[in-house]
């Protein structure tokens, strides 16, 4: 018992938007170093950095052109070494983002590969004389023409992100080299970007016709994915005290276990079921349903616990802000803390995305020019063939990834304490009220509530390892579940709405004490977004 990556929480940093240390309007590594004490004060164990490698930034770093160097916007390799050092000094860990399903089209390998069919690097990528019918996850066709070889190359994301050919053992050897390089520098693990897409059906046949994701049956958890991941595990990861969390899209728990049972390939995965509680395939918005959200999360608790390890997240750099999406901006403190209570008393490693701990909200941009994200622009362009400008702007406002990418709100100054220069993406005007400095002055501090939760997770092993059982799964806007250990028991009850609700518990609460709550209220009525954690020994 006692693995650091199971017991400790992770804080995700989107470097471009976290803290600008040199005044150019872009977040960077020295900015992160300035804020390490703050991160430590939350009680997290690990920091996950979204990509900081060299990149032309078409997808803000998820398109890497040099795996061995740092983008100049973010600093130098020396800054990075200093960062690892400072993180370790504070008894924390640092993991990086590993993006190896694809490279940037400006990577040396791809530039070479495009030159001729017999170039050494040609076989590093996936080519066809005539494109098949696969579509890109960012919308549109997954193939782009290369004149010099008179072929098309595959890109499951933007055309600037050509997919690597993992069938080629040289590609896999390059990936192992990259991993060893960073692990030897002291990095403690990786978040592996879309790792369940790396193996494609040989021959790249046509997919079944569908409205989206055409071809996905030929690359989701493809034929050799386990072979590749085991190879990397055995040749690289077994030699380091590190961990991997794989981002796996369109994943079912049964398939997840093929990656994580006994931690044989990956230590844990990110799944997306609960991210569909308010949409269908992201851009088809539907009314948020608490029952749908509960069903998704409960399914993963029941099917994974005991055989694998869950991740607990509501936010990341690809998702809208959870207070806006699942909570209520009018009950800002209450819904932000309720969501944290609901999520982080479950079994799994907590992931907190920068700004979530102060309840940062969606950007509420009104003009297309305010957005910076390539996926948002792609979807707008495609969507406009079917929908009006107004209709598309409504979808984007709700779902764009830029909702999560506005600068971190540190204080109420002009650029929110993120920078003293106009940032690369607009600061949310609500930083006047919602910011770290102000939050910490308030009696209703969301940060302090997060600290309490993470503190309790350190104090009580039952929150980490106890069994999970949900009550009233079909009751709307109501959360009730228990965590049971050998010597104690927790009961979590939340009112997931702005209406006052009668407290309903599955058993008599005599002998339980109220260990954590976002109100000061012990009667039988739950106020809007009230959350209670009851505790009993024995
Ligand atoms: O995202 C994978 C992914 O498919 C989605 O989460 C994506 O953001 C989009 O919403 C699909 O509709 C990962 C990274 O997290 C993301 O930032 C990258 O853009 C993407 O891979 C490509 O590397
Ligand atoms: Ca900077």
Image: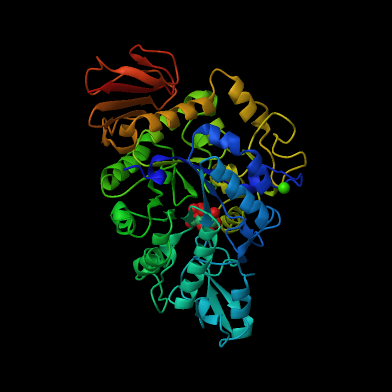
Above or below, 28 relative to 469: below
Nearer to us in this view, 107 or 315: 107
The percent coordinates of residue 338 (x first, y second) are: 43, 27
The image quadrant that residue 25 belongs to is top right
Residue 501 can be seen in this image: yes
Residue 392 can be seen in this image: no
Going by the image, does 507 lie left or right of 422? left
* Extreme residue in the top direction: 523
The residue sitting at 49% across, 34% down in the picture is 43
Q: Quadrant of the C terminus?
A: top left
Q: How many marks?
A: 0
The residue sitting at 67% across, 43% down in the picture is 31
Above or below, 18 relative to 483: below
The residue sitting at 40% across, 18% down in the picture is 500
Nearer to us in this view, 36 or 113: 36
Above or below, 112 relative to 372: below
Above or below, 504 relative to 474: above
The percent coordinates of residue 312 (x first, y second) are: 41, 42
Q: Quadrant of the N terminus?
A: top left
How is the protein colored in the picture?
rainbow
The residue sitting at 59% across, 75% down in the picture is 109
* Extreme residue in the bottom direction: 118
Going by the image, does 228 lie left or right of 324? left
The percent coordinates of residue 115 (x first, y second) are: 63, 83
Nearer to us in this view, 537 or 250: 537
The percent coordinates of residue 421 (x first, y second) are: 77, 41
């Amino acid at each position: 018992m006692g693995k650091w990556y199971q017991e400790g929480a992770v804080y995700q940093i989107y470097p471009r938007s976290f803290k600008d240390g040199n005044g150019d309007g872009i977040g960077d590594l020295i900015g992160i170093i300035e804020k390490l004490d703050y991160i430590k004060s939350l009680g997290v164990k690990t920091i996950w950095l979204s990509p900081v490698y060299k990149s032309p930034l078409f997808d803000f770093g998820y398109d890497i052109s040099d795996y061995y160097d740092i983008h100049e916007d973010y600093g130098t390799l020396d800054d990075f070494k200093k960062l690892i050092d400072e993180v370790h000094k504070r008894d924390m860990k640092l993991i990086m983002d590993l993006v190896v399903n694809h490279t940037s089209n400006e990577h040396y390998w791809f530039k070479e590969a495009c030159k001729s069919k017999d170039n050494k690097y040609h076989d590093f990528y996936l080519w066809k004389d005539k494109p098949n019918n696969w579509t890109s996850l960012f919308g549109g066709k997954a193939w782009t023409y290369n004149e010099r070889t008179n072929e098309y190359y595959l890109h499951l994301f933007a055309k600037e992100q050509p997919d690597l050919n993992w069938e080629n053992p040289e590609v896999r050897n390059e990936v192992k080299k990259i991993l060893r390089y960073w692990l030897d520098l002291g990095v403690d693990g990786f978040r592996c970007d879309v790792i369940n897409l790396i193996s494609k059906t040989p021959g790249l046949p046509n997919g079944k016709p569908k409205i989206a994701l055409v071809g996905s049956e030929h690359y989701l958890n493809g034929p050799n994915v386990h072979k590749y991941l085991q190879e990397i595990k055995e040749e690289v990861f077994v030699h380091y005290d590190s961990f991997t969390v794989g981002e796996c899209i369109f994943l079912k728990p049964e398939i997840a276990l093929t990656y994580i049972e006994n931690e044989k390939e990956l230590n844990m995965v990110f799944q997306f079921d609960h991210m569909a509680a308010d949409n269908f395939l992201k851009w088809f918005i539907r009314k948020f349903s608490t029952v749908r959200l509960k069903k998704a999360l409960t399914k993963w608790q029941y099917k994974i616990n005991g055989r694998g390890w869950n991740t607990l997240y509501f936010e990341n750099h690809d998702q809208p802000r959870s207070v806006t999406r699942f909570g209520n901006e009018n009950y800002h403190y209450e819904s932000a803390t309720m969501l944290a209570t609901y999520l982080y008393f479950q079994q799994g490693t907590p992931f907190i995305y920068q700004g979530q701990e102060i309840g940062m909200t969606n950007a509420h941009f009104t003009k297309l020019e305010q957005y910076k994200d390539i996926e948002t622009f792609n979807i707008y362009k495609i969507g406009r063939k079917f929908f009006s400008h107004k209709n598309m702007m409504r979808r984007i406002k709700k779902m764009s990834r830029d909702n999560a990418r506005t600068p971190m709100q540190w204080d109420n100054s002009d650029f929110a304490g993120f920078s003293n220069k106009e940032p690369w993406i607009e600061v949310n005007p609500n930083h006047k009220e919602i910011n770290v400095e102000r939050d910490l002055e308030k009696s209703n501090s969301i940060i302090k509530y997060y600290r309490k939760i993470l503190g309790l997770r350190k104090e009580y092993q039952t929150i980490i390892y106890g069994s999970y059982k949900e009550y009233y799964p079909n009751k709307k806007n109501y959360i009730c579940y228990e965590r049971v250990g050998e010597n104690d028991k927790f009961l979590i009850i939340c009112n997931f709405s702005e209406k006052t609700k009668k407290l309903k518990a599955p058993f008599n609460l005599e002998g339980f004490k109220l260990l954590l709550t976002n109100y000061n209220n012990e009667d039988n009525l739950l106020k809007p977004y009230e959350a209670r954690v009851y505790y009993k020994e024995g």
